[in-house]
Image (cartoon, grey):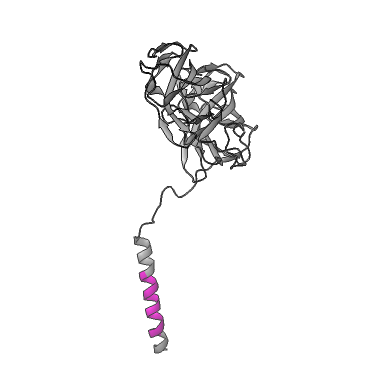
């Protein structure tokens, strides 16, 4: 009996010490490790979001784009390493009173394949217009809306989060986003979610830069004097005439520094832009102000050896996507 007591007492003492330690040690809490609660949603489904001031929300369509979007006086244009995720949705007032709706009232976050979050632009438009939307919705009134999110150029965006007050919707966008137009999509990505960094372009067609639409009207070799100087001995100029259309809502200035050009000759050599912008049919420097939608014709030129033809002319602005024109047929 004494042996039994000697065995049990140490065990009881150990249990007592463990229980005391557990009672005095605070519970360790790690924040941010639990995913926010949310409802799984699909395109075309309608949800009532918010309790204090509910709104009905329906995501109608999502699409990828590399074209500029104008909302109010702001231009949203993707850089070469970006594309835009455009969200088309409907907002409906289910309440018996007027409810204001504008951009902060619904929050959108795109989540890319690397789980990086991309917030939406702080503006929404009435869908189909450039009108910046801020509206008092009457009871039962519905409005179609456009929101814009800048996302990485490469690959698709698998997730979208939509939030109002404490309500959260989770969309699985895989296979649900309208792909890019074939003319700008990289054929290596069969999903159509990745744009080309350099887009093949044709004469006589307008293409969108950030502030301008540009159209290559004419390419030719010339021996005439440009910028007051004839070509050097054994050289000639490759002249390229473009039409610029100002797409800024309030208009703006244009100058040579708005553009980046590179000419590749038939030998593959790179000929850098000389920083000169001339009027299309006069040997005078071009530059000035264009109103919204106004056009001007301008000329860029490059010096080449007389026995070397051009191959490709590339035009871009700032950090935007470049357009490549085949000039190999110019003689």
Q: Residue shown at 54%/32% (left/top)?
A: 199
**Residue 17 screen position, x and y as percent:** 35, 70
- Principal secondary structure, stretch drawn in magenta: helix
**Residue 67 screen position, x and y as percent:** 53, 26
Q: Quadrant of residue 319?
A: top left
Instruction: From the viewer's side, name the closer residue of 147 and 142.
Output: 147
Instruction: From the viewer's side, name the closer residue of 234 and 36.
Output: 234
Q: Is residue 311 magenta?
A: no
Q: Residue furthest front?
A: 233
Q: Quadrant of residue 200?
A: top right
**Residue 311 screen position, x and y as percent:** 51, 32
Q: Give the magenta-colored segment's residue range.
A: 5-17
Q: Is residue 10 magenta?
A: yes
Residue 61 as seen in the image, left or right of residue 213: right
**Residue 83 screen position, x and y as percent:** 51, 33
Q: Is residue 140 above or below residue 315?
A: above
Instruction: From the viewer's side, name the closer residue of 233 and 82.
Output: 233
Q: Residue shown at 40%/72% (left/top)?
A: 15
Residue 279 as seen in the image, left or right of residue 85: left
Q: Is residue 30 above or below residue 203?
A: below
Instruction: From the viewer's side, name the closer residue of 128 and 184.
Output: 184
Residue 75 in sight: yes
């Amino acid at each position: 009996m004494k042996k039994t007591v000697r065995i049990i007492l140490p065990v009881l003492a150990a249990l007592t010490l463990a229980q005391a330690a557990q009672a005095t040690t605070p519970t360790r809490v790690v924040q941010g490790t639990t995913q926010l609660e949310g409802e799984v949603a699909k395109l075309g489904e309608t949800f009532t979001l918010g309790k204090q001031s509910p709104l009905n929300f329906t995501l109608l369509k999502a699409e990828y784009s590399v074209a500029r979007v104008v909302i109010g006086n702001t231009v949203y244009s993707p850089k070469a390493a970006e594309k835009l995720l455009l969200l088309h949705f409907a907002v409906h007032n289910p309440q018996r009173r007027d409810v204001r709706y504008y951009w902060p009232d619904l929050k959108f976050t795109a989540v890319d394949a690397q789980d990086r979050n991309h917030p939406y632009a702080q503006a929404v438009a009435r869908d189909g217009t450039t009108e910046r939307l801020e509206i008092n919705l009457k009871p039962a009134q519905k409005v179609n809306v456009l929101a814009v999110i800048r996302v990485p150029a490469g690959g698709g965006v698998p997730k979208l989060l939509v939030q109002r007050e404490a309500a959260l919707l989770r969309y699985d966008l895989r296979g649900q986003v309208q792909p890019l137009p074939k003319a700008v999509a990289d054929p290596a990505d069969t999903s159509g979610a990745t744009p080309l960094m350099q887009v093949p372009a044709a004469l006589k067609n307008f293409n969108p830069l950030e502030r301008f639409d540009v159209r290559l009207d004419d390419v030719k070799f010339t021996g005439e004097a440009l910028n007051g100087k004839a070509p050097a001995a054994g050289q000639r100029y490759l002249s390229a005439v473009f039409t610029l259309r100002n797409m800024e809502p309030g208009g703006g200035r244009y100058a040579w520094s708005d553009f980046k050009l590179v000419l590749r000759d038939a030998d593959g050599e790179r000929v850098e832009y000389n920083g000169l912008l001339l009027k299309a049919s006069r040997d005078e420097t071009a530059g000035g102000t264009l109103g919204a939608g106004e056009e001007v014709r301008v000329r860029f030129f490059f010096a080449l050896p007389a026995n070397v033809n051009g191959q490709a002319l590339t035009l871009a602005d700032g950090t935007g996507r470049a357009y490549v024109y085949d000039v190999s047929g110019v003689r």
